[in-house]
Image (spheres, grey):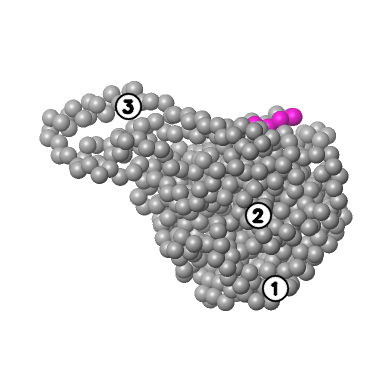
Amino acid sequence: MGKKGKKEKKGRGAEKTAAKMEKKVSKRSRKEEEDLEALIAHFQTLDATKTQIVETPCPPPSPRLHASLSAHPEKDELILFGGEYFNGQKTFMYNELYVYNIRKDAWTKVEIPSPPPRRCAHQAVVVPQCGGQLWIFGGEFASPDGEQFYHYKDLWVLHLATRTWEQVRSTGGPSGRSGHRMVAWKRQLILFGGFHESTRDYIYYNDVYAFNLDTFTWSRLSPSGAGPTPRSGCQMSVTPQGSIVIYGGYSKQRVKKDVDRGTQHSDMFLLQPEDGREGRWVWTRINPAGATPTPRSGFSVAVTPNHQTLLFGGVCDEEEEESLEGDFLNDLHFYDATRNRWFAGRLKGPKSEKKKRRRGKKAELEGADKQEHGRAGAQEPLEVVREVVTEDGTVVTIKQTLAAPGSAGQPRSDEEDSPDEAGGPVVEPSPRSNAMLAVKHGRLYLYGGMFEAGDRQVTLSDLYCLDLHKMQEWTALVEMDPGAQEWLEETDSEEDSDEDEGTEGGDEDEDSGESSGEAGGECGACAGEGWQETHGRAAPEAAAPRQT
């Protein structure tokens, strides 16, 4: 009795501490948000001048980070919304809507009256009813200098059939946040976690909310059991059994004054509805078998046609008090909820044109001996390093780790098609974090992301495709040269520049986003305190810690 009572008292104390911290953060951030609300209102005034739907064929979108990429439920289209871009001196925020026609390999910019305010690090979920709907919640707006952040708590729906935006107003929903995750579960949207940050304080969440798509009402869920600790940037997906799986994520805590320490989580939980108890949920921690991904943040998630969860890339950080170094990744992992097992995604390589050869029993025995010998003498993974010189003379080093020949998966027999012996250049996305993923007709589409080169952050705008049924090789649909991306070094005069200049820059980008994007740029929040929150990890030395 004594131990139980002590444990319950400790739990209530933790809840009170969390409530006090949330109140403290809310109070301090309110002044900042009031300042940014005026800037957001200015941009909304500009958007109000648009009274008609205008569809304009265009080049691929300019580089941006923390946008959302969603597959249309009925058409062969991908929908890109929002995002941010940082050129080393100024942050640009977007609320642009782009549509990629898969069959035509063509982009269209779609301007719709009364869109949501500019934002990044939001969540977007597509549901099929009424010709398709794209639901968007939350996200953040960064000031032009990247030092202040406004966290949204609004809910929007894009009616894809009529191409109209609608803001859905309902009380009792989540507080303003970024880096949260949201999925469609039956006739509900389920939202978990995220973070809120002001100039001096921050808070991470592990709360769960449900939005009913029939009644348009929010409810806060109170699952029983021990659930995930507060975090943002985690994996959240629905399993074939009707549960919701949470994996990984990022959070940080203050270890002493002005020093924060980040945590890359690697634990996994199931959120399940209790049998026969409507509206009641329970948390269960699980320990999957197989090739678990290495700890990382900034990874991207999609669901495959056979209902497995796919995880791509991210960054593994080595964090010290005054510095941060990260290894960026471009590997694939699959989680099979039915078997509760992770699998490493391995590509078979391009299909050979050589005819299959039949083997007799003697050849089969010899082949078996060779396979055993090959396992014993397996080659180590190959690290490819290439250097790109930018316009200002900075050398950007890009590292890629390629699987050694014959080391991926089971050894191939002579009866199988083998990769071409020509050994052409490998086509694949470069290592990166925060890429945007979508799956359509069994194909994985990957857009953008970012990586770091010293104090520079390179924001990408390339587009790749991978057939998940064949798992042979990536196809580059849109390529870009990271070395051609402009990076403006910060100066004292720019640090002291007024906010009006930033407002003008953002407006200019709205009218001609391609011009700033072609110059390249980094993620908008990267220059400010909020970088790590939006990205799900800590910032490099050039920026204060932040995450999504």
Where does the image place residue 112, in percent across and percent down from the top left?
A: 64, 71
Residue at 56% across, 72% down: 160
Range of magenta residues: 321-326
Residue 546 position by quadrant: top right
Taking 354 as reference, is 106 left or right?
A: right
Residue 375's disc is 3
Q: Are marks 1 and 2 in contact (CB under 8 Å)?
A: no
Where does the image place residue 461, in percent across and percent down from the top left?
A: 57, 50
Mark 2 or 3: in front is: 2
Mark 1 or 3: in front is: 1
Q: CA distance from mark 1 to mark 2?
A: 21 Å
Taking 427 as reference, is 451 left or right?
A: right
Q: CA distance from mark 2 to mark 3?
A: 52 Å
Q: Nearer the viewer, residue 189 or 534?
A: 534
At label 3, the amino acid type is Arg
Residue 340 seen in render: no
